[in-house]
Each structure stands twice: as structure tokens, then as C-alpha cells.
Image (cartoon, grey):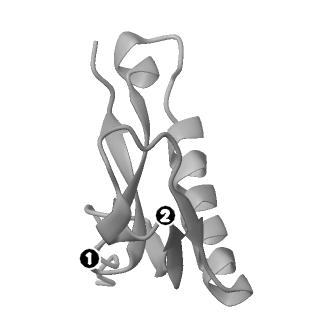
Amino acid sequence: MIQEPTKKTFSFGGCSFCNTSPKRLDLKPDTKILNVMMTFEEALKLNLAIDECVRRLNSYKRSTKSGRSTGLNLAIHLEAGRVTVNEERLPD
């Protein structure tokens, strides 16, 4: 009997970023925009992770409440210098 591969349940992947503007230490409560810079190769990884998540979201029946209440969460881990893509249940 062939065993199916285990599916990831926590993240669709992510990437590293090299810099933010403003710098993490300069962030203030009134900061309106955080620019996240990454290399082309890391941007490709992020693109793939977002694409995988969107494909999963597209497989749900959007005419149902549970189908409409799922979305994409882009988590920026400032201290680790990482961005991850996760599926998330949206607030009602």
C-alpha cells in the first residue's frame, strides 16, 4: 500500500527579507507604511507561497459562509527577517 505524503498544515512557505524601511527599531505606533525589501530569488519564493495559498482558497466553495470566511494571512516576522504565507479564517 502506498502511503500519501503528509500535507503541510501550518504554512504555504515563505521567504527571507533583507531590509525594512523604516528600520524595525524606528517603527512607531503612527507608522503608516512598512516597506519590506527582498532579493529577486526570495521574491520568487514568496510568489510561489502566495500562489499555492490562493489555489487552495480557490478550491473552496465560495457560495458558502465557510468558503467565504477563509483568506490569506501574510505574516511578517520582523525579528527573524521572514515572511510566511498562511491560510486564515477571517473574522466575522
Foreground residue among 36 and 31:
31
Foreground residue among 13 and 31:
31
Q: Residue at x 34, y 79 (%)?
A: 5
**Disc 1 versus disc 2: distance between alpha carbons?**
14 Å
Please determine whether, in this image, residue 74 is positioned above or below residue 20.
Answer: above
Q: Amino acid at mark 2?
A: Pro
Q: Kindly identify which numbered label has been placed on residue 69.
A: none
- Say if mark 1 contacts mark 2, CB within 8 Å: no
List x then y, in percent, for residue 38: 61, 79
Name the residue beneath numbered marker 1: 79
List x then y, in percent, for residue 85: 43, 59
Quick check: 67 left or right of 53? left
Q: Residue at x 29, y 80 (%)?
A: 80
Name the residue beneath numbered marker 2: 22
Q: Residue at x 53, y 46 (%)?
A: 33
Are there few (<14), some (14-19), or many (20+) residues within 10 Å of tag 1? few
Q: Residue at x 46, y 73 (%)?
A: 14
Farthest right residue in view = 40
